[in-house]
Amino acid sequence: MKPTQRDIVVLIHGLGRSPRSLLALRFWLWRAGYKVISVSYPSRRVTVQTAVDQWLKPALAKLRLTKGTRVHFVTHSLGGILFRAWAENRDPSFPLGRTVMLGPPNQGSEVLAELGHSPWLRRLLGPVIHELGVDETSTPRRLGAVPPGTGVIMGNKPVISLFRDLLGPESDGIVTVAGGWVAGQADFMVTQADHTFMMWRPRVLRAVERFLKEGAFISHTEWAMADSLSPASS
């Protein structure tokens, strides 16, 4: 599905970041024909729900929506949890399009659960450090399935292996690959990328654009080619 000038993409950054961290995505999607909006919020000073109520919702309320407009989302890390918290109680009339979540801690974060033992890190990272644990009471685990048309991209090549013993071999250095899985996802992609810089990689940028247009990270033509080369098809 081709975007029109009425299509909007909302970008939501992660913990300790700012809209500048998503500048490559902003430019790439603008070149692809979308109107791109960045939502900024004080990620180290507020809870997930406060960020949704006081920053995300007001930003969405300011959007100038015309007939036929669809609003897509692209999020990084904690931004994906904000999106899920908003989407769970969204107005059914909101023209939600597709969503791509980059490195989301959908099952909580082992790293933040570990760092939460340190008083000074709790002060540095703010109240969300208490929300993003891996127990069943954590905010990501209490949220329901994602809306239809949501895809997840996870990295598996950390630049710094500081948390390798904690996360295991399959992670982006901050979130495990398995930790990105969420009920309701339409597609799931793993690529050689680090959590911090994955949104600057050309392969990720191309995958985001393709998903917003087609609802999948790999095209139907590529799937057909893969099937034709598989042993089962011979």
Image: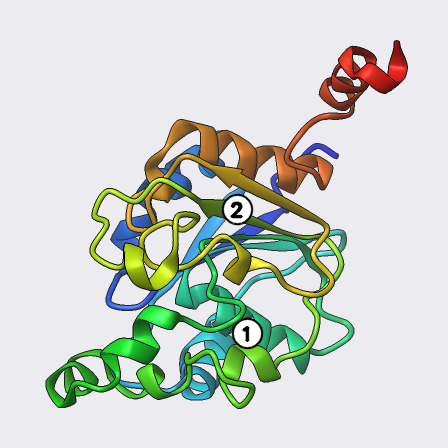
Dividing the image into 4 quarters, which one contains the C terminus? top right
With 208 as the anchor, is 196 left or right in this view? left
**Residue at the spot x=41%, y=85% of the render?**
131
Q: Which residue is mark 1?
A: 61
- Mark 2: amino acid: Ile
**Which x, y percent locates residue 143?**
62, 80
The residue located at (82%, 12%) in the rendering is 228
Residue 47 position by quadrant: bottom left
Report the disc number at residue 153: 2
- The reply, left or right, for residue 187 in relation to residue 108 is right
Return the mark for residue 101: none
Q: Is residue 37 left or right of residue 158?
A: right
Counting from the top left corner in percent of width and height, residue 67 is at 75, 55
Among numbered discs 2 and 1, the one appearing first in the sequence: 1
Label 1 CA crowd tier, 10 Å (few <14, some 14–19, many 20+): few
Q: Quadrant of residue 73?
A: bottom right
Residue lying at 53% horizontally and 77% vertically, measured from the top left:
140
Q: Is residue 68 visible?
A: yes
Across the whole image, how many numbered discs are drawn on residues?
2
User: In this rendering, would 122 be left or right of 85?
Assistant: left
Q: Residue at x 74, y 18 (%)?
A: 226
